[in-house]
Image (cartoon, rainbow, N blue to C red):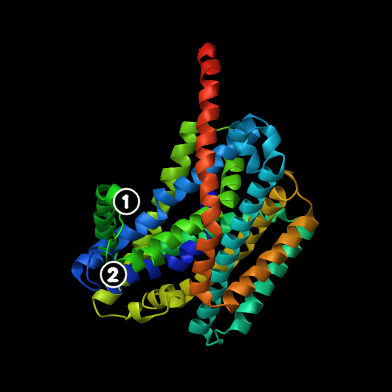
Amino acid sequence: MLFSAGMGIGLVFWTTAEPISHAYTATPIHQAGTQAAIDDSLQFAFFHWGIHAWAVYAIVALAFAYFNFHKGYPGLVSATLTPLFGEKQMQGPLGKLLDILAVIATVTGVSATLGFGALQISEGLNFLFNIPANFTTQILIIIMATALFIWSTWSGLSKGIKMLSNINMILAFIVLVVVFIIGPTLYILNMFTNSLGHYIAHFFDMSLRLTINNPEKSQWIQNWTVFYWAWWISWAPFVGIFIARVSRGRTIKEFIIGVLFVPSLVCFIFFAVFGASAIYLQDNGIANIAGEAIETATFATLEHFPLGFVMSIVTLVVVMIFFVTSADSATYVLGMLSTNGDNYPGSWVKVSWGIMLALFAFVMLLTGGTQAIQNLLIIAALPFSFVIIFMIWSLFKALAAERPRLSKRK
């Protein structure tokens, strides 16, 4: 559930498209299409989807868990900053502003993800069944998914949604295992090992890389790295609260290991299997995956393997279920943030937020598809990035104040 909440649709959307793009379109270091670019393509995907992403979630989740469960504060972003600004300030206009920023970031981040999901489902339907991949199809997909979510909310199928989420992860792992077995297994293993080594060796170099006097490379960083950082920050309130709830009772050490390293490794495996398979097909002249649209790269890869059509249909189902479960989880968090931290927001509150998310996804798709979604994410995430910095400060201050009491226990 933690992995599903943290990545979901986005992972299925980019798991093939990003490595193939880094290998054959543009990278900040190597010329596109060269062996060096191919060798480092997964390294950049690991960089974007690994520890850096989950560290953003972990910061917010740890702050929520500590102040909500340990200190008994309301489940609000503003409550996590009480040690810095005081209870009076956090219950006043400043606190409300911080909670509004969290809501804006969450709405933008989740709506963007739903937009990506609608794009991939529509392109997948077109790729497999020649159904037109136009705005009308995308609207119908969002309406159907929203209707399913509203039905589940009003009928009280919260347990069913959780079960559906777990089943969905099983389906995703089945496709992963099948591709690994029937695909270029040795190539995948070699590329995974090589890329993981490069990722570890160049961890700080990639983290601090800024291109000076090179507009082309600066554009690459903006289109990929900055976009991803904005995406993770915009999802941080939603995923952070979710992780805090499912991690209740864990020590901070257990929490960090469980949130930072395990999900990162799972992401690396997904990118290695699908990304390396696509690069293998491209590099050996079997298929032109690099020439496919971002939304269809995964389907174009799967069709060249046995059971490809079946796996593509399963992938479509996975994206659709992620769509519904992401909306369900996000509206719970939005309901919580908009009802003064109520851990059990009413159904009508969740439904209202579900409709709002669908409308925002419509607007994003209408205004320009993937590029519009990326731009809106960056704009929405910037203010909340400062809130996260204050969260770190507040958490350290609270833990430092508690240290003498813990020392006396020993």
Q: Looking at the picture, which amino acid does disc 1 mark?
A: Leu
Q: Is residue 215 left or right of residue 175?
A: left
Residue 131 x, y percent position in the rendering:
56, 86
Q: Residue at x 70, y 63 (%)?
A: 354
Q: Residue at x 39, y 80 (%)?
A: 292
User: Which one is nearer the viewer's eye here, 313 or 266?
Assistant: 266
Residue 247 x, y percent position in the rendering:
57, 39
Q: Is residue 296 left or right of residue 247?
A: left
The residue that disc 1 covers is 208
State the separation of the CA atoms marked 1 and 2: 21 Å
Judged from the image, the secondary structure of the residue bearing numbered disc 2 is: helix
Residue 261 x, y percent position in the rendering:
41, 44
- Whether residues under marks 1 and 2 lie with C-beta atoms below 8 angstroms apart, the answer is no
Packing grade of label 2 (10 A; few <14, some 14-19, many >=20) is many
Judged from the image, the secondary structure of the residue bearing numbered disc 1 is: loop
The residue that disc 2 covers is 23
Quadrant of the image occupied by residue 119: bottom right
Q: Is residue 82 above or below residue 236?
A: above
Is residue 296 among the parts visible in the rendering? Answer: yes
User: Which one is nearer the viewer's eye here, 245 or 56?
Assistant: 56
Residue 306 x, y percent position in the rendering:
38, 75
Q: Residue at x 61, y 38 (%)?
A: 80
Q: Is residue 84 above or below residue 130?
A: above
Packing grade of label 1 (10 A; few <14, some 14-19, many >=20) is few
Q: Looking at the picture, which amino acid does disc 2 mark?
A: Ala
Q: Is residue 27 left or right of residue 16?
A: left
Quadrant of the image occupied by residue 341: top right
* Comes first in the chain, label 1 or label 2: 2
Q: Residue at x 36, y 78 (%)?
A: 304
Is residue 314 among the parts visible in the rendering? Answer: no
